[in-house]
Amino acid sequence: MTESQVLPTTYVTQPGAIVTSSGRTLHTDEMIINMGPQHPSTHGVLRLEIVVDGEIIVDVIPHIGYLHRCFEKHAEHMTNYQQVIPYCDRMDYVASMNNDHGYAVAVERLLKIQVPERVEYIRVIMAELQRIASHLIAIGTYGIDAGAFTPFLYCFTDREKILDLFEMTCGARLLYNYIWVGGLSHDIPPRFVEQAKEFCKYFRPRIKQFNDLLTYNEIFVKRTANVGVLPKDVAINYSSSGPMLRGSGVNWDLRRDDPYSIYDRFEWEPQVGKGEVGTVGDCWDRHIVRMREMEQSVNIIEQALAKIPEGNVQAAIPKRIRPDAGEVYVRTETPRGELGYYIISDGTASPYRVKVRAPAFVNLSVLPEISHGAMIADLVLIAGSVDIVLGEVDR
Amino acid sequence: MTPQEIFDDLKAQFGDGILDGKMDAQQPWIQIAGGRVKEICEYLRNDARLSFDYLSCLSGVDYNDGRLGVVYHLTSMGLRHKIVLKAFCTKENPHVQSVAGIWGTANWHEREAFDLIGVVFDGHPDLRRILLPYDWEGHPLRKDYKVPEFYDGMKVPY
């Protein structure tokens, strides 16, 4: 094995020049520093190769794959479609419900089956609770990135309450395997509706509290306003989705624009960034979109809890899943954005090909674009505002 | 526009660059020539009646019959229509034109398809492995992929 095969290309010096992994030759006053893979503010095992000129970022080259376990290969090797669901759980491990929901919807479209009303309602409630829980992590850890520790504790306190609801439903706190193709693994327990209503009532005023504590905090605003601005056209060109896209002022939410499940029955509004304290599409805008989305999720949950019908949640679960040969691409809105499952069936009991379009993967790809010219300290905030979960980036 | 109208429009514009179309599928798709992907996609994005500005997903597929495929899921945010494109190549000559210059998001998707399936995207600015280590051999999502016994001289435990 030659030396160039062993060493990362970063450190291979050609005569008189240092070249980055993407092939960029450094100028004399530039240098490379590595952030990660073991760095607390990369929110997981992400390595950022940063070319800096003093304190100013010239280029960022993300290196991903440290958590890669080839979900797609696993999915193709399962003996049936239901077995893939626990692997879906482990992609975006802070929003497992949404991952399962997307997969279940995709396979159901492939099978062309309808699920009972009660299942749809429970799925929506779970997905929105999970959205709040996921945004709470995003907001809490983002506070830490900006140097505010207290909001993190507040956020995790409230997230615990949601996890308690999940635990009483399906026994698991993080990886649920709850939403199955055609139904659910368990019906909700008797006191669930009451406790979820209590949570909504408790949580609404908490959002204002978070805003007072963090969102409008002067230091936080100064650190995030006008930082990492993602213009509208770049956001669309890079297929950003979720709060990343809406933060840039694009009114696009798959729950409304490519409806799935029963989201069209509820009254709620997608939230967009308006540049209230800086430029449209800055880090603060992405943060405020998450804050406001939590409120919208509470709206949806309350409406769904009020109307939840009776029924058997396992009535439509197929005994054996053998879709006709064909393919389907289904996208759903997770807390991070558009989660797409492209499933090809060859008529057998296991999927022929599953490709996951992971929102965090796609959102992260725009990071180099929005970090040019920022300070190193700001990169932490820019990367934090993208809200990546490396389990999903790497799959 | 409906998928049929999009197909007719492309057929009129590019003739034999459009190879096939399946309009009665659950999600209609159009097969395009791998060597003309770039001009077709540029037209799809820039034409005002089509304006496919959002590339949802780009997937590589091994069809296990000697063909590899690249599947593009396109959406127009303004006009709210969707279409699926497919471009095929052979395993011996796995070349398809890159669309990274048209949609920025294609950059990483194409690197992933190159990494896992082994499709080579001509004209890609930075075609490196993305998920697997840089010195990995082979493309794991190919159907004929053999799991290696050794990695870097170390025996892989299973």
Image (tube, rainbow, N blue to C red):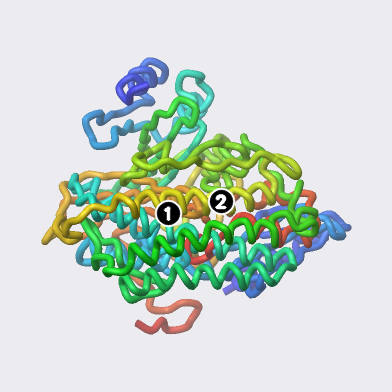
Residue highlighted by disc 1: B118
Residue closer to the observer: B112 or B145 = B112
Q: Position of residue B52 (x, y in %)?
A: 47, 29
Look at the image and tell me whether residue B88 can be seen.
Answer: no
Q: Amino acid at mark 2?
A: Asn
Residue at horizontal 57 percent and vertical 52 percent from the top: A290
Screen quadrant of the N terminus of chain A? bottom right
Residue at horizontal 28 percent and vertical 66 percent from the top: A188
Q: Amino acid at mark 1?
A: Gly
Q: Secondary structure at mark 1?
A: loop
Q: Nearer the viewer, mark 2 or mark 1?
A: 2
Q: Position of residue B85 (x, y in %)?
A: 37, 35
Screen quadrant of the C terminus of chain A? bottom left
Q: Which mark is residue A257?
A: none
Task: Report the residue that reaches farthest toward the left.
Answer: A319
Chain of the residue where label 1 is placed in the rendered structure: B
Compared to residue A133, the image places residue A358 above or below, namely above
Residue closer to the observer: A307 or B98 = A307
Residue at horizontal 27 percent and vertical 68 percent from the top: A190
Label 1 CA crowd tier, 10 Å (few <14, some 14–19, many 20+): many
Residue closer to the observer: B65 or A229 = A229
Residue highlighted by disc 2: A363
Q: CA distance from mark 2 to mark 1?
A: 23 Å
Q: Quadrant of residue A187?
A: bottom left
